Image (tube, rainbow, N blue to C red):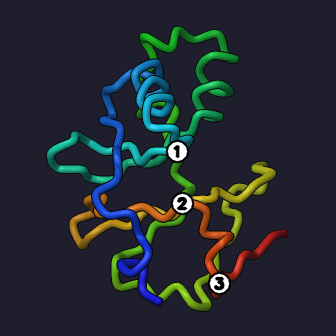
Amino acid sequence: MLAREIMISEPLVAAAGATSAEVALLMRAKDISVVPVVDNPKDRRYLGTISDRDIVMQCVAAGHDPTDCPAETHARHDTTVVTPDTELVGYRIERLDVSDAHIRSTIVVVDHDKRVVGFIPHPELIHGIVFVRE
């Protein structure tokens, strides 16, 4: 099973310069909890991902103003990234940051120019993907 066969094509993204408040509003409006962060909406070059938890823990709980906090500042870089032609049966997802108690439950799909072309939420529900937990 290739990534392209199960990905959500052209997913919603957050521009690097968007504020955490703007990203949170997008998440609420679309009922999503994670979005890829890109350089800009036109080029869509992948920079990281940001989740609702990242906004709460790294921005709000840290005492920052979410209307003045760029999404790129709190974007994570440990999300699994694959290409559309990546075979997912037998694909291993490992926890990259040992201080992180959970594995990021998303996969970002990028093309050869690192542009976001797809998104796979909840890969733990996909038969054949192997999760490695320490």
The kind of residue on which mark 2 rests is: Pro
Of circles 3 and 1, the one toward us is 3
Q: Establish if 11 lies above or below 33.
A: below
Element at badge 2? strand
Could you say where residue 131 lies in the image, as x and y percent from the top left? 72, 75
Q: Establish if 108 lies above or below 75.
A: below
What residue do we see at 36% from left, 78% from top? Answer: 4
The kind of residue on which mark 3 rests is: His
Residue 86 - label: none
Could you say where residue 91 lies in the image, as x and y percent from the top left? 58, 84
| Precedes in sequence: disc 3 or disc 1 | 1
Q: Which residue is mark 1?
A: 34
Q: Which residue is mark 2?
A: 121
Q: Establish if 71 lies above or below 9.
A: above
For the residues labelled 3 and 1, the Cα–Cα distance comes to 22 Å
What residue do we see at 47% from left, 90% from top? Answer: 1
Crowding around mark 2 (Cα neighbors within 10 Å: few <14, some 14 to 19, many 20+) is many
Contact flag, marks 1 and 2 (Cβ < 8 Å): yes
Q: Which residue is mark 3?
A: 127
Looking at the image, residue 100 sits to the left or right of residue 12; the answer is: right
Element at badge 3? loop
Element at badge 1? strand
For the residues labelled 3 and 2, the Cα–Cα distance comes to 13 Å
| Precedes in sequence: disc 1 or disc 2 | 1
| Precedes in sequence: disc 3 or disc 2 | 2
The kind of residue on which mark 1 rests is: Val
Q: Give the number of callouts.
A: 3
